[in-house]
């Protein structure tokens, strides 16, 4: 049977997420393990991990999209594209510094391909260029994608 405190914490999760976080942190700090809402705590931990992966994928997709534009629309290159590429590369670097285990995604060819295909589609829509203008497979290595000085040639 659930304790009254646990039921209150579970209700708090549904009604005021921030308050639930604060209360959960206090319970963890004071080692009140029996009072923890483990079901929701586990769910949030899993979601936090997924959030980190999505942040990496989002930054990578932006870099890829802008590298594709840089490669396939040289006449339209702008300083803003360089700024975006640099900013997102730095964001990726920060994510990898904070969570080194995210490197495994960069070593996963299927994950890179999925991210590239999304960037490719996004770039096609944004530029109006036809699908056949873009490489089917990612034309950049992971090292090139992350290299602050790399910009593709035509």
Image (cartoon, grey):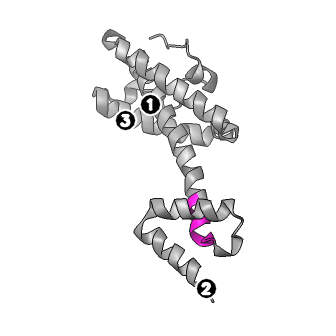
Tell me the element at label 1.
Answer: helix
Q: Residue at x 60, y 42 (%)?
A: 110
Is residue 70 a member of the stretch shown in magenta?
A: no
Chain-order first, disc 1 or disc 2: 2
Q: Which residue is mark 3?
A: 122
- In reply to whether residue 43 is colored magenta, the answer given is yes
Q: Would you name the residue on which mark 1 appears?
A: 62
Is residue 73 shown to the viewer in this render?
A: no
Residue 16 vs 127, above or below: the answer is below
Q: CA gap, disc 1 to disc 3?
A: 9 Å
Q: In 3D space, how far apart are the residues under numbered discs 2 and 3 (Cα atoms)?
A: 49 Å
Question: x, y (%) of residue 40?
Answer: 56, 68
- Mark sitting earlier along the chain (2/3): 2
Q: Mark 2, mark 3: which one is toward the viewer? A: 2
Q: Position of residue 116 (x, y in %)?
A: 50, 35
Tell me residue 81's x, y (percent). Answer: 38, 18
* Magenta-tinted stretch: 36-44
Regarding mark 2 in the picture, which secondary structure is present there? loop
Q: Earlier in the sequence, mark 1 or mark 3?
A: 1
The residue wearing badge 2 is 2
Residue drawn at point x = 44 percent, y = 11 percent = 154
Mark 1 or mark 2: which is in front? 2
Left or right position of 126 against 5:
left
Local crowd size for mark 1, using a 10 Å CA cut-off: few (<14), some (14–19), many (≥20)? many
Helix, strand or loop at label 3? It is helix
């Amino acid at each position: 049977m659930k304790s009254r405190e646990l039921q209150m914490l579970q209700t708090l999760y549904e009604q005021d997420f921030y308050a639930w976080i604060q209360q959960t942190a206090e319970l963890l700090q004071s080692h009140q393990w029996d009072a923890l809402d483990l079901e929701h705590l586990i769910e949030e931990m899993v979601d936090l991990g997924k959030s980190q992966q999505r942040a990496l994928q989002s930054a990578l997709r932006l870099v890829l999209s802008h590298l594709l534009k840089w490669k396939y629309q040289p006449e339209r290159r702008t300083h803003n594209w360089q700024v975006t590429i640099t900013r997102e590369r730095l964001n990726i670097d920060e994510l990898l510094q904070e969570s080194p285990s995210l490197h495994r995604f960069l070593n996963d060819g299927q994950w890179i391909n999925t991210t590239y295909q999304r960037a490719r589609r996004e770039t096609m829509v944004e530029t109006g260029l036809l699908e056949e203008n873009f490489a089917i497979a990612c034309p950049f290595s992971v090292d090139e994608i992350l290299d602050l000085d790399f910009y593709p040639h035509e």
